[in-house]
Image (tube, rainbow, N blue to C red):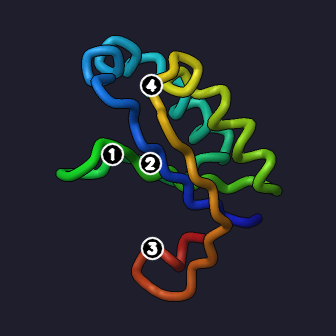
Amino acid sequence: MPLFATTYRYAADSTAARDTHRPAHRDYLGELTERGELALSGPFVGGEDGALLVFETATEADTVALTDADPFVIEGLVAEITVREWQTVSGRLSQYV
């Protein structure tokens, strides 16, 4: 199944709201992980606030639908989302996909 590298750029001044909605966001990501649709995710460290999520779905549209249902997105805490199909070629984790 294809992988989709997805980035979130968080909305300005959304830190407090993200703290409030983080439990629901993480519960949702946990559900996606259990269903096999989320391979990994986590925030970027330093620089502009954002995150990388790698989805394993059949189509880009499926990935977009999953991000649209994320509590962070529903609450307007994500200013920009990019989704690109990603092909792993080498590296320690490539053996798992």
In this view, 90 is above or below 57: below
Amino acid beneath label 1: Pro
Marks counted in the figure total 4
Disc 1 to disc 2, C-alpha distance? 7 Å
Residue at horizontal 33%, vertical 45%?
43
Residue to which mark 4 is pinned: 77
Which quadrant does the N terminus fall into? bottom right
In this view, 93 is above or below 54: below
Give the mark toward the camera: 1 or 2. Answer: 1
Where residue 41 appears, as percent x and y from the top left, is: 44, 48
Q: Say whether disc 3 or disc 4 marks the residue closer to the N-terminus.
A: 4
Where residue 92 appears, as percent x and y from the top left, is: 40, 80
Instruction: Classify residue 95 as left or right of residue 51.
Output: right
Disc 1 to disc 3, C-alpha distance? 18 Å
Give the mark toward the camera: 2 or 3. Answer: 2
Looking at the rendered structure, the secondary structure element under dot 4 is loop
Give the mark toward the camera: 1 or 3. Answer: 1
Instruction: Classify residue 32 as left or right of residue 13.
Output: right
Q: Say whether disc 1 or disc 3 marks the residue closer to the N-terminus.
A: 1
Looking at the rendered structure, the secondary structure element under dot 1 is strand
Give the mark toward the camera: 4 or 2. Answer: 4
Label 4, residues with CA under 10 Å away: few <14, some 14-19, many ≥20? many
The numbered dot on residue 41 is 2
Residue to which mark 1 is pinned: 43
The numbered dot on residue 93 is 3
Where residue 91 appears, as percent x and y from the top left, is: 42, 84
In this view, 38 is above or below 68: below
Q: Between 89 and 64, which is closer to the camera in this rendering? A: 64
Instruction: Classify residue 18 as left or right of residue 55.
Output: left
Label 1, residues with CA under 10 Å away: few <14, some 14-19, many ≥20? few
| Callout 1–callout 3 Cβ contact below 8 Å | no
